[in-house]
Amino acid sequence: MGFLSKLMKNPLVQMALPAALSFAAGPVFGALGAKPLFANMSPLMANALKQTALGYGTAALSGSRRPGRAAMVAGLTSIPFSYLSAANAASQFNQDYGGMRGMERFDVTPAKNTFSYQEPNPAMDFFPGGQTMTTTPAVQGFRSVPGNVPTVTPMDILTGKTRSVTLPSTLQAMDPAVDAGGIYSNVDGQTFYGNIVPGETVNLDANIFNKPEIIDGVPTGRFKTDFLPTAVSQAAGLYAGRDTPEEEFEAAKRRRRKELAFLYGVDESLIGGEMDNPFYQGAFMNTGGIASLDMDKGGDVSGPGGPKDDMIDAKLSDGEFVMTAKAVENFGNGSRMEGAKRMYKMMNKLDPESEKMGER
């Protein structure tokens, strides 16, 4: 996970990641779109949730401190693209089918039965005479169906109000020499050979992951991946989830502190500033740095570690003598502070130029 986290923090990877997600998002979310989780949602909500999920995962993988914010911004950024997709779908549908009227077949002249009667002819015993019926077939025609295809708005598609439209039946011309099933019919007083074709169902969606393929202005019925919406949404999410300048500065300090700790061979907690050598700091390092002591004038030692840990580097002069912590404590009858006071007093008496305890 460490390698992956470092990889995701690489600026080049972060720049390429939205494009890579765009390649994968089309087929993946195209398949998921049919699942109940997204199928019953409006296209607006489904697109936003898909981009939100992508945004959260991308931010989490890149080590962002705010994957939630990145996810929210990615989802919100997808809304304009969802509207544009819905607007394009509505415009194309209205252009192709808006106001379209259906056709139906009806009898222009109904079928008619004609009856006639002839008297029997005695000379022709094979023709006894009687009543006969002659049927005149109906003359059929086509007429428009009342009502027409409604105009669809982008919001109808975006909110899921209109998910599909079933077109009315249409009139299809046929070639009597080739096609079977057609009929000779009357259309506006002229004989016509054709038939009624049931209307198809046109699905309407605001898909921001795929877009219809159009060649020479004519839709081919195929779809191709639309990279721009996902790339922009994920880039916006990554930008929103980035560290603040203060956080970047603190992260840089932590990295530099690790480097300096490795350089000096000490614990990170003992590193002060960039230009501070931990071996030349003052005796009282209550902030956690190494107490590197200049013992030219003697004095009490206070710093990290215990009485026998030897964690403090001290600068000593030739001829100086260092007492153990236990000796100091025993000299003060169990009190380290009292022992230090007494040793200061003894040192100042023996060496008047030595450091006074008050100077500490």
Image (cartoon, grey):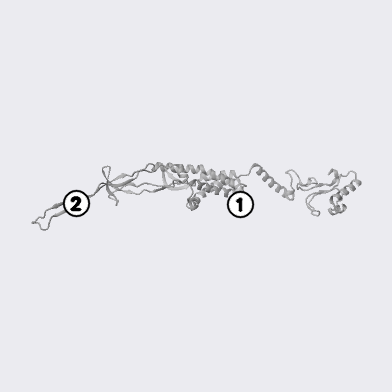
Q: Regarding mark 2 in the picture, which secondary structure is present there?
A: strand
Residue 243 occupies quadrant: top right
Q: Three-letter amino acid code at disc 1?
A: Leu
Q: Is residue 48 visible?
A: yes
Circle 2: is it few (<14), some (14-19), or many (20+) Cα within 10 Å?
Answer: few
Please identify the residue farthest to the right as the structure is shown. 350
Residue 231, position as x, y percentages in the image: 53, 45
| Image location (x, y in percent) of residue 278 | 76, 47
Look at label 2 and name its amino acid.
Thr
Decide which of 312, 121 is in the foreground and name it: 121
- Residue 216 visible at all: no
Q: Is residue 341 left or right of residue 54?
A: right
User: Residue 214, relative to residue 1: is it above or below?
Assistant: above
Q: How many marks?
A: 2
Q: Position of residue 265 (x, y in %)?
A: 74, 50
Q: Which residue is mark 1?
A: 4
**In this view, which residue lies farthest toward the left?**
123
On the image, the x and y values in percent for residue 142 come to 29, 45
Residue at which label 2 appears: 134
